Image (cartoon, rainbow, N blue to C red):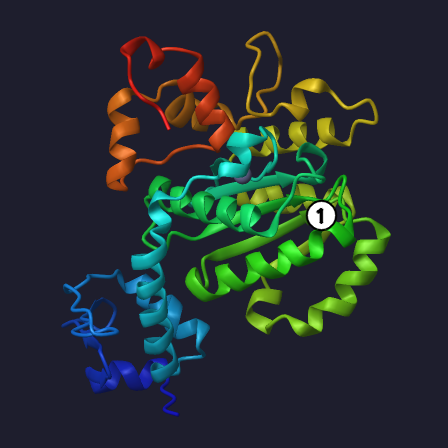
Amino acid sequence: MRRIGKRSVRKKGYVTCFTVWIRAASTPRTWDFSITTPKLGGYRYKTIKLSNNSLRRFLVACDWDLSSAAARLRDTLQWRREYKPQHVICHRCRETPGCHSMRQVGFDKDGRPVLYMCFAQCSTTEQTVDGAVQHVIALLENAAKSSDQESCGYVWVLDLQGFKFFSSQKIAVAIEKVVSKHYPELLEALLVVNPGLFFHTVWHAMRRFIDQNTRSKIHLYRDKPRLQEKFHNLFPCELREWLFNEINLNLNSQYPKAQKTFWKYNHGDMHDPRGCASYVQKYVDNITLADYEDSFDRTFHLPHKNVLDEVLLRGKFKACGMKYH
Ligand SMILES: [Zn+2]
């Protein structure tokens, strides 16, 4: 097995390994990576351009082992060709609105998509492993479309209010498997809020089974001052306030109905559970027919399936006689 360091890649300039060619650009700080897959399972692929960061992510995930990174990249390309994740929609959410609450709600200070999920908002009895994986794939694919960042990394705020360990274990393992295999090193930070004492204990037992790099990105917040400080450093004021409102409302013992139907918004309410104002304005309320059609060409971000359904089925596109699936 061949292991290379970042520095040795830079010095060597050209490295060839099976079907991957990584070419160093003329300046040491910029890289022009390209990948050509002449044959994969007997099928001839076109040359596929990948960004520097995409290739770097696979190398980092494989601890800079070039052979492993190349194999993993080939697997992912094959998976993308067969599974077509860019066209995935969550059927569970369509059949059972609110089945999954994980959704994009805005961007952090660096323009990275911010995802939020609260167990109290989703239907814990309707969960299936395949459905949850499908939901996460659709979410990550759309998060990447909304980001101007080359890295396409994201920040995830996981609210454990309503969490039940036994019902979530299999789903968490299945999601982790797909994400680490096909979307490596995209997670910039996972902020876990409202972890009960039980989860805290379980986490300390679990953490040694998670690789160090991923572990370093996961932070548990039981006390509010530390959470406030983290949110202040990471999120712009608008999103920070939205997150605190959302988390507080989901903590409410008399659970507000509007929070359970987070994909709807009554314009008389103070808080919009669909996301912070700028995100909703750009990707929800002002979505146009052209934007929606453009999403099939993999360029335009679509929000959570139920948020999208609510906008498209309720109103303006129906009047156009457009078929919406
Ligand atoms: Zn879903």
Q: Residue at x 27, y 37 (%)?
A: 296
**SS label for mark 1:** helix
**For residue 151, above or below residue 45:** above
Q: Amino acid at mark 1?
A: Arg
Whether 293 is drawn above or below 199: the answer is above
Residue 13: horizontal and vertical position, in percent? 19, 82
Left or right of 207: which side holds 175?
A: left
Residue drawn at the location 28% of the way across and 13% of the way down: 321
Q: Which residue is mark 1?
A: 226
Screen quadrant of the C terminus: top left
User: Quarter-wise, where is residue 49 in the image?
Assistant: bottom left
Circle 1 packing at 10 Å, graded few (<14), some (14-19), many (20+), is few
Up/down of 231 relative to 4, above or below:
above
Residue 4 vs residue 49, the one in the foreground: 49
Q: Is residue 237 visible?
A: no
Residue at 32% across / 8% down in the picture? Answer: 319
